[in-house]
Each structure stands twice: as structure tokens, then as C-alpha cells.
Image (cartoon, helix red, strand yellow):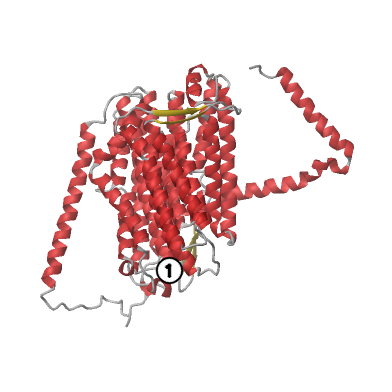
Amino acid sequence: MTLFLIGLALVLAGGVSAVATRRGDGRRGDVLYQALVAGGCVAAAVDPARVLAGRPAVTLAVRATTPGGDWVLGIDALSAVFLVAVLGVSALCAVFGTHDLRREAADHHDGVRRPTWFAQLSFAVLVVAIALVVAARSVVVFLGAWEVMAIGSYVLIVTHHEVADVRRAGLIYLVATHTATLALFVMFSTWQVGASDWTFAALGAASPSLSAGARLAILLLALFAFGFKAGLVPLHFWLPPAHAAAPSHVSALMSGVVIKTGIYGLLRVLLMLGGAPAWWGWLVLGIGATSGVLGVLWALAQHDTKRLLAYHSVENIGIILMGIGVGVLGVAHGAPAIALLGFAGGLLHTVNHALFKSLLFLGAGAVYRATGTRNMEELGGLARRMPWTWAGFIIGAAAIIGVPPFNGFVSEWLVYQGLFAAGQSSELLRLALLGIPALALIGALALACFTKVAGVVFLGTARSARAAGAEEAGRGAIAAMLLLAGTCVVLGSLPPLGLALVTGAARALAGTSVVVPEAVVSSAWTISLLALVTAGLVSVLWAVRTAALRRRIVRYEPTWGCGYDAVTPRMQYTASSFASSILGMFGRLSGARVEKTALALHTHSVDLVLDGVALPMWSAMHRVALRMRALQHGGGRLHFYLLSILGALLALLAYLVVGPRP
């Protein structure tokens, strides 16, 4: 654990260096910040990498005299999977963010010149907090790091706090995350009643003696609290506005890493409890399918690139939950092979999503920095002006829709195989086969959505002067995107490599020593190899064609313009027109509202949960609170105020007299 802690200290030192060098040479300060943060992430990742390579789990305990017992940290197979993803993505996001913030400080096209040192310090603190959440082995350390992670995320979300929508997004996030934190307090308090102390080891040892009611409460509270952080439907409503409001590299970190702490929390609870009943597995599988379908459907209705990507996070959390649900059902029904496929698919998709979603957010951030807009209707033709960003974005888009030979295909293939294997069971488990149509629908809608994004943003002609004058991002930003893109290709081209990362943790969750069937691995490898060969042949043919045409005079003619003298940008598909026919099949469930005129078609989206449920409920609570405000002072009469206090004390005393004894 020593190298892990040294690495985290270096990350913090990077944040401090940004403060120390804020009045000096900005570029030298940025280089120092990048070196410390990236170097710290690499150093901290050594211990998790060793555990993934087969070394024993490591633990560090610090004696504490404060309430809550000892402070314990540890890295086992489950923590190692998440830490590798956290630290790898954080290092690249830090590099991209440095270049992005520098360009923002130079441009300040919004009229506000804001310093970068505070954002860099907050980013470093957030990275350390996330790593400590995953490494924590005691409740005090876990909840402390969880709260620092929540506040650090909020500070970065409201970086552009002078904008009203940003402040609103930050408030919604703050309310949501602390609601989840309160549920965690209740969950751990319920769990600790029969435990000797507040360490995870003690809670795990006390799990067999828990009553049925306590286990039910723990499982439901864990799903609520960690589901809120992960962004599952209907607890997702904080996620799209928060990710859209934050700086792009922060959005990448939040979508790729922060929401995965919710997935980690669920899996850690499963390990500590020793499994979950079948009904919980069915519940998680159903919520996952619902989140996946609705998340991608609502993404299709968006015109803001970052909000669209945020809804795709909801979709991919749904796919991860489907894998976890299959794993839980496999354990509950005594089918270890099915459980291993489900957990391995969910874990690998967690890692893969961290990679390709971070890549997509960084690509969207590069586009925003070059054009000053996230509205797809004002973009177009950027592939010619930003070829490296286009290359990275298209790889991320292919990965997220599960196209081989990219990493998203491998993890989704494992989830598919788990569902197919469940369908061959003779027990009730075979009903899990119904998840296959849901997963297929998710893939089809994701294909339509990223066809829209890639076509409207990068292809065609520019729809505005800002898009026409776009320039490529800096070298550091491009390097960060290409490293993520290369990792997506490597993990997709070599399926056993990604599977090796998650096998240990998946076995621990499934409670088995079996291996993933060779047929599953070989079939994934065969498909990826065929895709690689096809891509190679296409590249060779393209190169031959290009070389042959160099020696010939080529005549280019414009395509038929439907009888018009000149083709204009208005003749292209817009984001609204491309998606309207698909969204129309789902009616009001899509969240899209269509506005048609004689000359144009526009759509705008609403979040059915945020705008239809959460905000009206908040307004009602606000009105009730205002009416009850007079009770705070006893209606202006002192004796009423004293009587209310006395009544509360009597109620508490009555509970102590007749309530349950420890």
C-alpha cells in the first residue's frame, strides 16, 4: 500500500503546485501539474496492477481513537479493477483539462476570465477522494472519502457559476448526492448493530447473523443510495444537467469514473453480504433493462452534445446492471458459470465505459472549445477541420455501440452470453432470456444516436461561422484522446486481455473458481479478428485507389441538388429531422416535443423525471415548508414553542422505554 499512498500524495502535490505557481509562468506550472498528477496516478496504479496479476490482496490499518474505530485501507481484486480504471482515466483527463483550461483562459469568449489553479486543485482532490472510496475498508474512511468526492464534484460542476443553469445543475446534484449519502448512513447503521466495529471485515462477519428484515433493508438502501450515484432510472435526473454544466474533462471523469463508484458500492455490498436473493437479481436486471432503453431513447432526443453523452451514461449503467443482475441470479440458482459471465460482463463494461465515454466527452469538449457551442444544429463539417478529434470520436462512437473490434463489443458479448446461458436453464432463471431483446434494442437505438451525432457534427458542411472557423485541439489534448482510443482498440482486438482484468473479481462475486467457457472467449476473438481483417482490407484498397488516382486526372462533379442552383447547409439533415421519425414511434415517452412550421422542424427535450416529478415535488415541499414556517416560533407565542419542544422530548423518552433493546 506504500506506493499507492505515495501516488495519491503526488496527485495532491500536483494540485498544490497549481496554487503555488499561479502567479508565475503558466505553462511551466501546467507542465509541473501534469507531471505530478499523471505520475502520481501511475505510481498509485502499481499496487492494483500487482493484485490483478495474481499477487495477494494488501491491507493497511491505522489505529484511531476517534469514534468509528480504526481506519482501514485495502486493495483486493474488486478494488483493483476500479482503481486501474480510475487512475488511468484521471491521468489522461488531467492532461486534457490542462490544455482545455489554458485555451479557455486565453479565449474567455464568455467575457469572464477565471483562474485555472482552483479547478486544478479541486480536480486533484477529487481524484484522491475517488481512489480512497474504492480502497476504503472501514465505514468512517468510506463515508469521509465519499463526502469529499461529492463536494469536490460539486465545486467542479459549478466552475462556470456565473451561468444560472450551471448553478441550478449544481444545486440539483448537491441535493441528490446528499440524499444518497443519508441513505448510506442508514444502511451502515442498520448493518453495524450486530458487528463488533465499523470495519468492512466486521460487517461481513456479522452478515450471516442479520435478520431477514435487516438484509432486506440493506439491499434496498444500497440499491437506492448507490443507484443514485450511478444514475439509474428514475434516480438519474441529476446526471444530465451536471455533466453538461461541468468542464469537459470533469464531465469525462464524472461519467467515466465518479458514477462507477455507485457500481463499486453495490458490488462491495454483495461481497460483504455473501450474495443476494433471486428477487434482488430480478429487480436489478429489470432496472438495468429499463435504464438502458430509456437512457438511449432520451439521448436520441438531445441536441446538446454533452447532454446526449450524459444520457448515454444512463444507458450504459443499465447494461452494467443487467450484467450484475444475471450474476446475482446465477448465484441464487446455483449456476456458477452463468454468474461468472454476468459479473465478468458487468465489470468489463464498467472498465470499457470508463474508457470510451471519457474519450467521447473529451472529443465533445474539443469541439466546444473550437466552436464555442454544444448545439449540434450549429455544427457540421468538422471532420475536415479537426481530423484527429474526428478519428478519436468515431472510435469512441463505434466502441459505445458495441462494434467489433472495439472494447464495447467484448463486454456486451459477455452479457449476451450470460443471458443466452440463462435461457438454457430449466428453472425460472430462463426468463432472463427476455433481457436479450432489451439489449438488442439498446444497441439499435445507440447506433441511430451516434449516426446522428457523427453525421450532424462532423460530416456535411458547416452550419455556422463558428463551425467553419474551427481549429484542431492542442497536441496534449489530442494525445490524451488518442491514448484512450488506442486502449479501446487494444481491449477490443484482444478479448482475453480485458477478461483477465476482471476474472478475479468476477470469481469472488460469483463464489466460484470456474473459468469463462473457452467457446465464449474464442468466439469473441474470432469476431474481433474478422473485423480487424476487414478493416485492414478496406484500408489497403483505399490506399491502392488513392495511389492509382494520383496518376490520373480526376473530374469531380457536384451531386444532384434536387433542382436547386446551389446546395446550402439548410438542405442537410438536422439533428431534429434525423431523429424525429424514430422518436415518434415512442410518443411522449421519448421526452421529445416537436415544433413544426411551414419552413422548419424543431424538437426540444424534457426530462420526464426531473421536469415531471422531481421539480414539482420540490415545489410542493417548498410551499408546505413556507406554510409551516410559523411553527418554528410557536406561531409567535412562546408557550406554544415550549410545548412543541416538550412534546418532542416525551416522544423520544417513550421510544427509549418501549423501543427495541440492543
Q: Is residue 419 left or right of residue 271?
A: left
Rendering coords of residue 55 (x, y %):
32, 29
Q: Is residue 538 left or right of residue 503?
A: left
Q: Quadrant of the N terminus?
A: top left
Q: Residue at x 59, y 41 (%)?
A: 178
Helix, strand or loop status at disc 1: helix
Rendering coords of residue 590 (x, y %):
46, 53
Does the rendering let one see residue 312? yes
Q: Quadrant of the C terminus?
A: top right
Q: Nearer the viewer, residue 605 or 510?
A: 510
Q: Quadrant of residue 348?
A: top left
Q: Quadrant of residue 472?
A: bottom left
* Residue projecting furthest to the bottom: 565
Q: How dense is the environment of label 1, judged by Cα within 10 Å: few (below 14), some, or many (20 and up)?
A: many
Q: Which residue is the site of mark 1? A: 371
Q: Nearer the viewer, residue 398 or 60?
A: 60
Residue 558 vs 296, above or below: the answer is below
Rendering coords of residue 310 (x, y %):
45, 52
Amino acid type at mark 1: Thr
Q: Nearer the viewer, residue 555 or 355?
A: 355
Q: Residue at x 42, y 28 (%)?
A: 59
Does the rendering let one see residue 583? no
